Image (tube, helix red, strand yellow):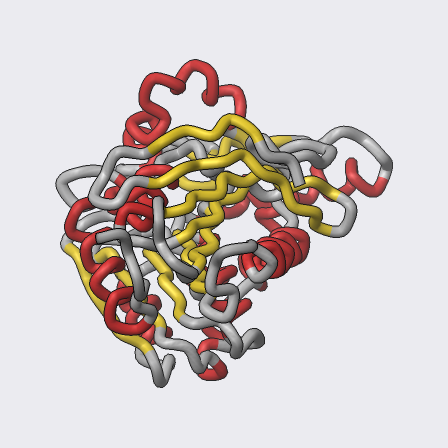
Amino acid sequence: MIFNDVWEGRGMTGYTREDVTFDSQGTACAAWLYRPTGAKNPPVIVMAHGFAAIRALRLDAYAARFADAGYAVVVFDYRGWGDSAGEPRRVLDIRAQQLDWRAGVAFARSIEGADTSRVVLWGSSFGGGHALHLAAEDHAVAAVIAQVPHVSGPASAFSRSPSLVARLIAAGVRDQIGAIAGRQPYRVAAVGYPGDVAMMTSPDAAPMAARLAGDRYEELLPENDVAARIALRVPFYSPDRRVHNITAPTLVQIAERDSVTPYHVALKAARRIATGEIRTYDCQHFEPYLEPHFDTIVADQIAFLGTHVPTGSLPG
């Protein structure tokens, strides 16, 4: 592990944040490790972002709230994305990301000074689907928070216009053939405006991506692409097929005007989780990350954690 760049948070309890790495099958995944100041054996929350996204896109805002509430937090980038190692860059490999999740959880369970028997999974969008997928097989996790989660491959892939679906599939075939031939990835935009050839083109996608990037927009703009082969795989990735196996308390937060993960599909999946709690919000898929919705959504997450995974001792 590599530790550096420790800084002090300013909140209810205060916290420190350290840059760390953990190994995922020989690839170093970059992460932030938040520790609440003075907390005794805090539970650990493991966090990762959604489709083609990196932790710098507002996951620190959530992690800071959790650390202020007394939780240790591990926030990581997938291999090939953000600050993590891995080549080629920005190839969204579903199985590899699932392995990164498992490695992140294993790292969380090794943190000295934390309650490693109480690890929480937090995922948003595609990462929410990964969290549900992992929770269905790892019954030792203490709780799950799935924010606007990807649950159904067909529902997400075919919620777009037939012409866009056809163009994305054609791009995916081109990229896959190139990969077999050893060529560099053929890429498409991850986020675009309605009418663009991009993986996500809901009305809120591009404007909200720009707001999430904030002052780093120009720096992060070149990373708004993904190897097109993922278009051939999303239709076959449906975490909702396994959610009935989840035993941990699970908060599923659903956007009522979501066109990336359609509302009725997400609601049906959430109702199949015996230990599930459902919260719905009058917003679109990308809006939970920022005001006016962020405060309400993260407050519901902290309340859920307080019920199911209380922090225990905090400085007095």
Between 172 and 226, the one nearer to me in the picture: 226
Residue visible at 58% across and 47% down in the picture: 231
The spot of residue 34 in percent (x, y) is 43, 43
Which residue shows up at 32% across the image and 45% down it?
62
**In which quadrant is the N terminus drawn?**
top right
Front residue (pair 310, 75):
310
Asked if one can make out residue 171 in the rendered structure from this viewpoint, the answer is no
Which residue is found at the position 45% from the left and 77% from the top?
A: 243
- Please determine whether, in this image, residue 154 is positioned above or below residue 248: above
**271 to the left or right of 247:** left
* Residue depicted at 43% across the width and 50% down the height: 73
The residue most toward the right is 181
The answer to whether any part of residue 256 appears in the image is yes
Farthest residue toward the front? Answer: 316
Q: Judge whether 18 appears above or below 142 on screen.
A: above
Q: Judge from the rendering whether residue 294 lies leftward or rightward of residue 40; answer left or right.
A: left
Q: Position of residue 82 (x, y in %)?
A: 56, 32
Q: Position of residue 48 (x, y in %)?
A: 48, 48
Residue 309's quadrant in the figure?
A: bottom left
User: Is 142 on the left or on the right of 96, as rendered?
Assistant: left
Q: Position of residue 312 (x, y in %)?
A: 31, 65
